[in-house]
């Protein structure tokens, strides 16, 4: 049984997907997609030996070694240019996802769609995607077991002029901020409450970090505006 989080990501892959799942861990996602679509194929990339071996065992267990290449390596180094059409990077921080994209950008030749699920700092990934002509086309916040996850889908669109998003839009997500789904509202209400407590503590410090406090207050204003 695939988690709701990973299943939600699979909805953004087309039929007959030809994709890489970077940081695949158990390779649950590529196995699920390939078991449900006999014409899909994938590469499961993993930097660490333990998860790489787990991925390999999982793929072998389902008899999918012919359609899922399990490769050990850092980020996009496991794929060749024009080898895949979609890239999934899920379950990591936004800074790491951004570094993986930046360090491997020449491997993105032929990639039409990037689907990311950053656990934190989604804004850095949005900025990178927009700057590199991957237009933000779908965003979704999902809730699973009391935790909130953001999924961002971006499509390669070099002919379209780059969007000029505001910092607020990068922070909350330009599409999320318009759609204001139930999960979006719940996620940011929770963060607002948590940040209010953090700011109180920060202000009590003997030498408060004024710059950090100002940054937090700005973000809280954005959240409040979005929740209105
Ligand atoms: N993608 C799966 C998911 O969403 O459930 C697994 C997420 S798991 C928390 C993150 C995985 O990314 C770990 O297995 C870790 O070894 C792998 N990882 C971290 N940095 C990586 C990198 N630079 N290249 C490839 N894999 C990486």
Image: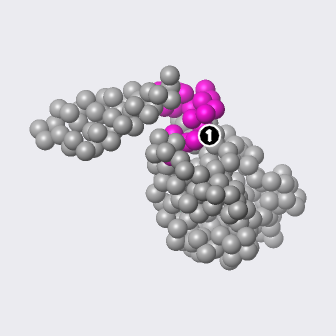
Query: Is residue 149 visible to us here?
Result: yes
Residue drawn at (62%, 29%) of the image = 181
Place of residue 222 in the rendered image (x, y in percent of width and height, measured from the top left): 44, 34
Mark yes or no: residue 57 visible: no
The quarter holding residue 134 reads bottom right
Quarter holding the N terminus? top right
Q: Which residue sits furthest left? A: 206
- The residue that appears at 36% across and 33% down in the rendered structure is 195
- Report the front residue among 128 and 50: 128
Image side of residue 123 versus residue 162, left or right: left
The quadrant holding residue 132 is: bottom right
Q: Identify the residue at the far right of this view.
A: 38
- Give the x, y percent position of residue 164: 55, 50
- The question of residue 180 being in magenta is answered with yes
| Residue tagged 1 | 175
Q: Residue at x 54, y 27 (%)?
A: 185
Residue 9 x %, y %: 68, 47
Part of the protein shown in magenta:
170-189
Q: Residue at the spot x=84%, y=54% of the render?
A: 15
Residue found farthest to the top: 228
Magenta span includes 109: no
Residue 10 x, y percent position in the rendering:
73, 49
């Amino acid at each position: 049984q695939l988690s709701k989080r990973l299943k939600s990501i699979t909805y953004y892959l087309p039929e007959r997907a030809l994709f890489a799942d970077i940081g695949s861990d158990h390779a649950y996602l590529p196995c699920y997609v390939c078991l449900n679509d006999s014409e899909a194929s994938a590469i499961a990339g993993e930097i660490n030996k333990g998860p790489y071996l787990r991925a390999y065992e999982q793929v072998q267990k389902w008899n999918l070694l012919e359609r899922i290449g399990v490769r050990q390596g850092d980020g996009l180094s496991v794929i060749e240019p024009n080898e895949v059409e979609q890239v999934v990077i899920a379950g990591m921080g936004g800074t790491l996802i951004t570094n993986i994209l930046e360090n491997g950008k020449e491997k993105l030749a032929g990639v039409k769609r990037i689907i990311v699920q950053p656990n934190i700092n989604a804004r850095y990934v949005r900025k990178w995607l927009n700057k590199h002509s991957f237009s933000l086309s779908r965003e979704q916040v999902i809730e699973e077991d009391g935790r909130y996850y953001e999924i961002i889908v971006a499509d390669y669109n070099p002919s379209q002029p780059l969007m000029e998003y505001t910092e607020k839009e990068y922070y909350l997500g330009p599409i999320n901020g318009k759609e204001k789904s139930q999960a979006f509202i719940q996620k940011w209400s929770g963060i607002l409450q948590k940040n209010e407590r953090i700011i109180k503590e920060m202000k009590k410090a003997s030498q408060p970090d004024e710059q950090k406090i100002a940054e937090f207050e700005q973000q809280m204003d954005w959240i409040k505006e979005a929740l209105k």
